[in-house]
Amino acid sequence: MSGMKNRSGGFTMAEIVVSLAVLGMVVAGLALSLRTFAKLNRCQWMRQHCIAAAQAQLDSIAVTGEAIRDEDFKRLWPDLSVSIKESAGTGQWEGMKLVQVTANGRTFGKEVKVQLCRYFLDEREQ
């Protein structure tokens, strides 16, 4: 009978070691997936910032006729850059101007770029 206790104890120790190894792999996988979700969340957050900045520029142009001043833009969105391109409307949009606003940002080494466009009445033609 005493021989049976020794064999059973060794088998239990092997089960514990295997269980701890499996548990360690599960925890490591969870940590990696959480890091991936953090990166995805950060990219989506940067995308939202880019959309807000580009929309604010278009709204400023619509209301005041001018873009947000550079110092105000940098104060509001210090980690973004923005470019504005204006062109004349063509086809059914003739007589209007097309304003394209592109906002760029970087997070986790990845560049996030959002471009929004809107047509406005061209004040020069009125």
Image (tube, rainbow, N blue to C red):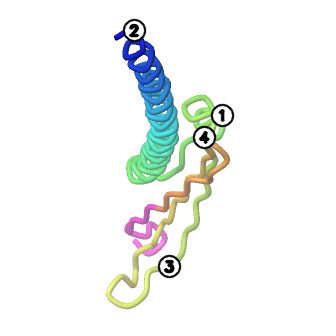
10 Å crowding of disc 4: few (<14), some (14-19), many (20+): few
Element at label 2: helix
**Do the numbered discs 1 and 4 sit on residues whose CB atoms are within 8 Å?**
yes
Q: CA distance from mark 4 to mark 3?
A: 23 Å
Q: Amino acid at mark 4?
A: Arg
- In the image, which residues are magenta? 116-126
- Residue 75 in the image: x percent, y percent? 60, 29
Magenta span contains residue 12 = no
Q: Is residue 51 above or below residue 30?
A: below
Is there CB contact under 8 Å for labels 1 and 2?
Answer: no
The residue pinned by badge 2 equals: 2
The relative height of residue 124 versus residue 69 in the rendered view (above or below) is: below
Q: Name the residue carrying label 1.
A: 71
Q: Of label 1 and label 2, which has the lower sequence position? A: 2
N-term mark: 2 or 4:
2
Query: Label 1 to label 2, Cα distance in Å?
Result: 83 Å
Nearer-N-terminus badge (4/3): 4
Instruction: Give, as a three-letter code, the residue at label 3.
Output: Ala
According to the picture, the residue beneath numbered tag 3 turns out to be: 88
